[in-house]
Amino acid sequence: MTLIQLSYVIMIAETGSMNKAAEQLYVSQPSLTKAVKELEKEIGVTLLYRSGKGVTLTNDGVEFLHYAKEIYRQYESLMKKYGKGGSYKKKFSVSTQHYSFAVKAFVDMAQEYDVSKYEFAIKETKTREVINDVSTMKSEIGVLYLSDFNRKAMEKLFHNAHLEFHHLVDCRAYVYLWRGHPLAGETSICFEQLAHYPCLAFDQGDNSSFYDAEEILSTSEYAQVIVANDRATMLNLMVGLNGYTLCSGIICEELNGLDYVAVPFQDDGTNSESTMEIGYITRKNLALSQTGEKYIEAMKRYLASA
């Protein structure tokens, strides 16, 4: 059974004539008759009753036509979207922890394309959602970090989700705060100096663990902690409450503005595991698309120049 045979039966039913159907389909009447007879033989059902007055559907033919129309409509919809000149747009999506460099790279990548012909998406989200999005192929690439503290837990999650982690850059922890903060002019900042200011952390959801935290040294004792769920809110809290967060220090001023600074975090005997390995995750054994490769290249270019 072929789609062509289905289209033949549909047209015959609509015209009520083999000759008229053949004209509409631009095929010869003998070819049309032969195709329908072959279909009837294949399925073991008589679909058409032929008489001197024309062609009508048998009872079996009426039921068959119902299913044939459903299938053919789906085929036509498929062709309208994916066929030559169809409306289908190639998709590319990234899920990431809250990194301005990841957004900047996305901007640089998108500028190389006619965005009207693509469906691009970037989502700054929770750590577990980054992993889940890539695992379920909602996103081709996920951007996050590993540290001595979370590495084993994260690598287990990657293994179970059939993901691979790819290194981008190693960096020390920085204290990120606004330029008007009393500590903004320091050459380095230690935990003791931060005790009087609220630590800002991104919300990781109700079922999260310490390993999911975007902020390094998440298990340290903080006198004050405020949780936010987006970057804009966190930046507002930095200004309004003199809050701070611990980050990679890779800040895109083009996107975040010039009102914020990153000051090196000063290790001490208690809080010394402050090295971050930032990278990206992909599905195992899945080759990156051309768009994905361009995005990775854009991240590497930016990180090399930062």
Image (cartoon, grey):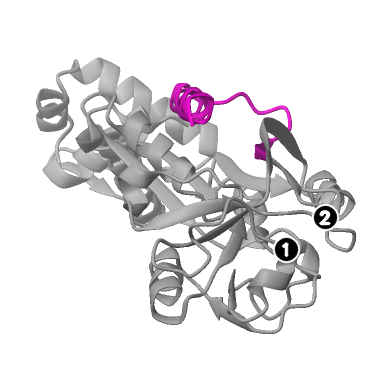
Let me know if residue 290 is in the magenta part.
yes
Alpha carbon separation for disc pair 2 and 1: 8 Å
Magenta stretch in the rendered image: 278-306
In contact (CB < 8 Å): disc 2 and disc 1? yes
- In this orientation, does residue 48 appear? no
Instruction: Determine whether 95 is above or below 203 in the image.
Output: above
Which amino acid lies under the numbered mark 2 shown in the image of this protein?
Answer: Asn
Residue 164: image x %, image y %? 74, 36
Residue identifier under label 2:
150
Residue name at image x 55 percent, y 68 percent = 244
Instruction: Determine whether 159 is above or below 265 in the image.
Output: above
Secondary structure of residue under mark 1: helix
Which is nearer the N-term, disc 2 or disc 1? 2
Tell me which corner region of the image, top left, top right, bottom left or bottom right, holds residue 114: top left
Please state which of residues 48 and 302 is positioned toward the viewer in this rendering.
302
Residue identifier under label 1:
212
Residue name at image x 20 percent, y 26 percent = 85
Residue name at image x 68 percent, y 81 percent = 206
Residue 62: image x %, image y %? 33, 55
Please state which of residues 51 and 134 is positioned toward the viewer in this rendering.
134
